[in-house]
Image (tube, rainbow, N blue to C red):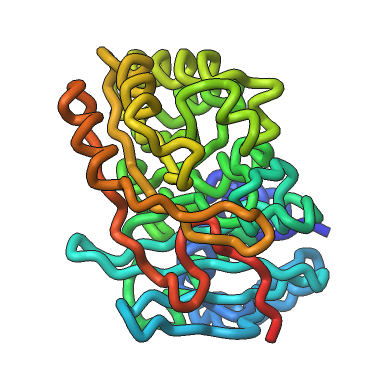
Amino acid sequence: MKTIKDMTLREMEDFMEEIGEKKFRAKQIYGWIYKGAEGYDDMRNIPKALREKLSSITEYENLKTVKVQKSLKDGTRKYLFELPDGERIETVFMKYRYGNSICVSSQAGCAMGCRFCASGINGLNRHLRPWEIAGQILEAEKETGEKINHVVVMGTGEPFHNYDNVAKFINLIHERAGLDISMRNITVSTCGLVERIADFADDFPQCTLAISLHAPTDDIRGSMMPVNDRYSVGDVISAAKAYADKTRRRVTYEYALVRGVNDSPDCADILAMRLKGSLCHVNLIPLNEVRESGLSSSKNAAAFRERLERNGISATVRRELGSDIDAACGQLRLNNG
């Protein structure tokens, strides 16, 4: 049975014609889906006969909101959602002066095993389908009553490990008949799956690429990120530079500062040398501590930023949001309580 929420508008138009219905019905149904309709019965301008037909030949599933946590510090909200098969994921809603942003998960669990990150502690359970990623936005908009206009794919999972579904998700939420989210307001983060960086440049030249780098050398990065065994620092940065050259879009390098590991002046100098001459920005993140990792947060963020900037590299220290509800970067772990 087909899942109607996984269809692009064009696919839905073709499907309507396949089942003997008028093509314009697709745009109506698509619009209802992205208004958060719980099912076909909510679609008031769709004839009853068509609603009944669709109910018999397609799946129309929704995420279940299990828990919502609200930060007392900054208004950030963290959602625990249940998928139709019982798997659970987390999503973070954040308020900024430029609008509302959401950090969505792309997998249930994660296979990358980064030492400093809580999300991969239990490994990967499965990829999320396109509608399951988009559904996180719909449920957050419904719960907050507010429009979301910026999306970051930085929650649980490695997005490029689930590339095809993430790509379709981007196209679904960009569609004008639905959420109409600008490609320029969508950021996708990867720990450095090099082949997919090239694909992303071809497929989504207007989106923003974020690289979870976190170290300037293979020795340091390898001690924290097993993916470095396959994709070296040099390989990842070369792929990111090629992306920037092709798209003319600035690459963001995410760098979690770990005390005594990657926060020295030498690390800043080596990082600056590697990035010099490229269209980039470094987003420094004082480590959000995860008890299992044994790693501690650095106090050197300001000095590290200043050293990068003296070497000609644009850098900022990320504003910490949602740390009191374990919603900050690297802290997403399933809290089923």
Q: Is residue 137 left or right of residue 252?
A: right
Q: In this picture, is 46 found above or below 19?
A: below
Q: In this picture, is 254 found above or below 242?
A: below
Quarter of the rendering containing residue 263: top left
Quarter of the rendering containing residue 255: top left
- Answer yes or no: is residue 256 visible: yes
Q: Is residue 130 left or right of residue 175?
A: right
Nearer the observer, 215 or 106: 215
Q: Is residue 184 left or right of residue 8?
A: left
Q: Position of residue 306 (x, y in %)?
A: 19, 36
Q: In this picture, is 148 found above or below 176?
A: below
Q: Position of residue 49 (x, y in %)?
A: 69, 77
- Residue visible at 73% across and 77% down? 52
Q: In this picture, is 144 found above or below 187?
A: below
State the residue lying farthest toward the front.
Answer: 260
Nearer the observer, 215 or 198: 215
Q: Position of residue 235 (x, y in %)?
A: 54, 14
- Residue visible at 32% across and 80% down? 73
Q: Position of residue 168 (x, y in %)?
A: 58, 43
- Residue visible at 65% across and 54% down? 293
- The total number of labels drawn is 0
Quadrant in which the N terminus is drawn: bottom right
Nearer the observer, 59 or 117: 117
Quarter of the rendering containing residue 312: top left
- Answer yes or no: is residue 25 visible: no
Q: Is residue 17 left or right of residue 134?
A: right
Quadrant in which the C terminus is drawn: bottom right
- Residue visible at 48% across and 59% down? 288
